């Protein structure tokens, strides 16, 4: 499948709202889905890191996926996050998770194990062989402890048919440019860094899978569309309008920042599952001040 033509623009790594009882808040999830779709985003990524996936059990994950399918009802494409550091377990999950209505699977490079580049290659090769949907690589060294190099990304892109794209969150502009220069024509490359989305699209990326677009879906998706049309004069003011908000989003932890914003917007309760905790009062007050501006 040519994901480049289907996942241009802004995808949102959506949060998982919780009630004060720590149960998944499906009413809030539905309101959030409507909020971001109605404000112009192009697709939704469910069960990403922003969704606090490590703290969800399998039943909750199934329920979230199925609820998301039902609520979106074909309005935008859905990507499902299925990753981890146990290759065999991921391959099993790809066979049992409800993926019939998903357009693709997003899978982060293994965390904690710190495999070699050959280990990462073999990990993804095996995942791709087991996946009923196209696989999007996810490179986020700040969380995984290891970098998926441009060389390995391009090797996977060229050699493994079912690997169709990458979410690149290394923050390394030079690495990103090597991927963009040498990728196959149909290989999707999107930013995983909200701050760098404008310059990365200028280098040739196809869009972003964003945390910030949970909170600023209209401004952020408008900015991305301007960038994709090479209208950077229109994109820059929106980029800088969101810049302070992006700083606050990641001041302490993701998704503590995004959940504080969504709480202030009246969309969710400000509840996270341990080991994550809500933002400190000082940063939260800065978010209130920013929104008031």
Image: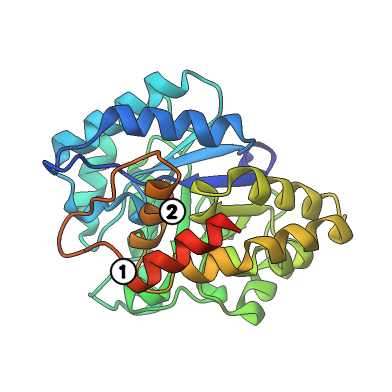
Per the image, label 2 sits on a secondary structure element best described as: helix
Instruction: Give neighbour class at mark 1: few <14, some 14-19, many 20+ (Cα, 10 Å).
Output: few
Q: Is residue 225 above or below residue 230?
A: above
Residue sitting at 28 percent across and 29 percent down?
26
**Coordinates of residue 250 in the picture (x, y in percent):** 44, 69
Residue 188 shows up from this direction: no
**Coordinates of residue 251 in the picture (x, y in percent):** 42, 74
Which residue is tagged 1? 281
In the image: residue 250, left or right of residue 228: left
Q: Which mark is residue 143?
A: none
Calculate the distance from the C-alpha at mark 1 to the C-alpha at mark 2: 13 Å
The front one of 55 and 133 is: 55
Residue sitting at 48 percent across and 68 percent down?
248
Residue sitting at 42 percent across and 25 percent down?
101
Q: Is residue 38 above or below residue 205?
A: above
Residue 195 shows up from this direction: yes
Total of numbered circles in the picture?
Answer: 2
Q: Quadrant of residue 124?
A: bottom left
Per the image, label 1 sits on a secondary structure element best described as: helix
- Looking at the image, the residue that sits furthest to the left is 21
User: Can you say which quadrant of the picture contains the N terminus?
Assistant: top right
Nearer the observer, disc 1 or disc 2?
1
**Coordinates of residue 133 in the picture (x, y in percent):** 43, 37
Instruction: Give neighbour class at mark 2: few <14, some 14-19, many 20+ (Cα, 10 Å).
Output: many
User: Can you say which quadrant of the picture contains the C terminus?
Assistant: bottom right
In the image: residue 194, left or right of residue 21: right
Q: How is the image coloured?
A: rainbow
Sequence-earlier tag: 1 or 2: 2
Q: Is residue 48 above or below residue 274?
A: above
Which residue is tagged 2? 261
């Amino acid at each position: 499948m040519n994901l480049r033509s289907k996942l241009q623009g802004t995808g949102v790594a959506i949060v998982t709202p919780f009630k004060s009882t720590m149960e998944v808040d499906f009413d809030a999830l539905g309101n959030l889905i409507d909020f971001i779709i109605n404000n112009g985003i192009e697709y939704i990524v469910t069960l990403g890191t922003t969704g606090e996936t490590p703290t969800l059990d399998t039943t909750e994950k199934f329920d979230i996926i199925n609820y998301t399918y039902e609520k979106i009802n074909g309005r935008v494409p859905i990507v499902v996050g299925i990753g981890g550091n146990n290759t065999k377990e991921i391959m099993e999950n790809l066979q049992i998770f409800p993926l019939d209505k998903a357009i693709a699977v997003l899978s982060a490079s293994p965390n904690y194990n710190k495999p070699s580049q050959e280990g990462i290659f073999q990990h993804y090769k095996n995942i791709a062989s087991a996946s009923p949907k196209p696989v999007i690589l996810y490179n986020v060294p700040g969380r995984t402890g290891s970098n998926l190099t441009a060389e390995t990304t391009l090797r996977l892109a060229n050699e493994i048919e079912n690997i169709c794209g990458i979410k690149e969150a290394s923050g390394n502009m030079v690495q990103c440019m090597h991927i963009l220069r040498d990728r196959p024509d149909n290989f999707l490359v999107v930013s995983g860094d909200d701050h760098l989305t404008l310059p990365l699209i200028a280098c040739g990326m196809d869009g972003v899978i964003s945390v910030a677009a949970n909170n600023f879906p209209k401004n952020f998706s408008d900015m991305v569309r301007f960038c994709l049309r090479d209208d950077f004069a229109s994109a820059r003011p929106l980029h800088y309008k969101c810049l302070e908000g992006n700083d606050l989003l990641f001041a302490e932890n993701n998704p503590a920042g995004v959940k504080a914003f969504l709480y202030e917007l009246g969309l969710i309760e400000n509840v996270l599952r341990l080991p994550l905790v809500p933002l400190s009062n000082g940063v939260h007050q800065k978010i209130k001040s920013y929104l008031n501006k």
